[in-house]
Image: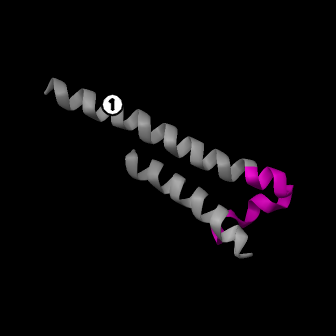
C-alpha cells in the first residue's frame, strides 16, 4: 500500500511543479476540463490522499510486525 501512496504523492507533486513550466502530465490532462480551481483541488487531493494512505499503511505494517 505504501507504493500506491507514494505514487499518488509523487504524481500530485510532479503535476504541480510541471504546471509552472506549462507541461501537464498526460495522466492528469483530463482534470483541466473542469477549470483551474478544480484541477488544483484534484492535485492537492492526490497529495493528501497519498499521505493519509502512507501513514495508515505504516501503522498497520508496524503493528502486525510487532505481534509476530
From the viewer's perspective, is residue 28 above or below residue 63?
below
Residue extent of the magenta highlight: 25-40
Residue sticking out furthest to the right: 35
- How far across and how far down the image is residue 44, in percent? 66, 48
Q: Residue at x 34, y 31 (%)?
A: 59
- Which of the pair 8/20 is nearer the observer? 20
User: In this image, 66 relative to 15: left or right?
Assistant: left
Q: Which residue is mark 1?
A: 60
Nearer to us in this view, 6 or 31 = 6
The reply, left or right, for residue 41 in relation to residue 59 is right
The residue shown at (80%, 61%) is: 32
* Residue 33: % across, % down: 84, 61
User: If the image is split into quadrants, where does the C terminus sit?
Assistant: top left
Q: Residue at x 38, y 37 (%)?
A: 57
Count residues near mark 1 (Cα–Cα under 10 Å), then give few for <14, some for 14-19, many for 20+.
few
Vertical side of 44 occupied by 57: above or below: above
Image quadrant where residue 12 sits: bottom right
Q: Tag count in the figure?
A: 1
Q: Is residue 5 above or below residue 7?
A: above
The image quarter in which residue 55 lies: top left
Q: Quadrant of the N terminus?
A: top left
User: x, y (%) of residue 39?
Assistant: 76, 55
Q: Residue at x 83, y 52 (%)?
A: 37
Residue 34 x, y percent position in the rendering: 85, 55
Q: Main secondary structure of the magenta part?
A: helix
Element type at mark 1: helix
The stretch drawn in magenta includes residue 55: no
In this view, 39 is above or below 50: below
Q: Nearer the viewer, residue 63 or 27?
A: 63
Q: Is residue 41 left or right of residue 57?
A: right
Amino acid at each position: 500500500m505504501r507504493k500506491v501512496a507514494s505514487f499518488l504523492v509523487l504524481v500530485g507533486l510532479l503535476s504541480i511543479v510541471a504546471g509552472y513550466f506549462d507541461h501537464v502530465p498526460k495522466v492528469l490532462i483530463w482534470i483541466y476540463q473542469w477549470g483551474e480551481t478544480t484541477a488544483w483541488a484534484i492535485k492537492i487531493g492526490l497529495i493528501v490522499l497519498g499521505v493519509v494512505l502512507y501513514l495508515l499503511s505504516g501503522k498497520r505494517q508496524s503493528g502486525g510486525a510487532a505481534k509476530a
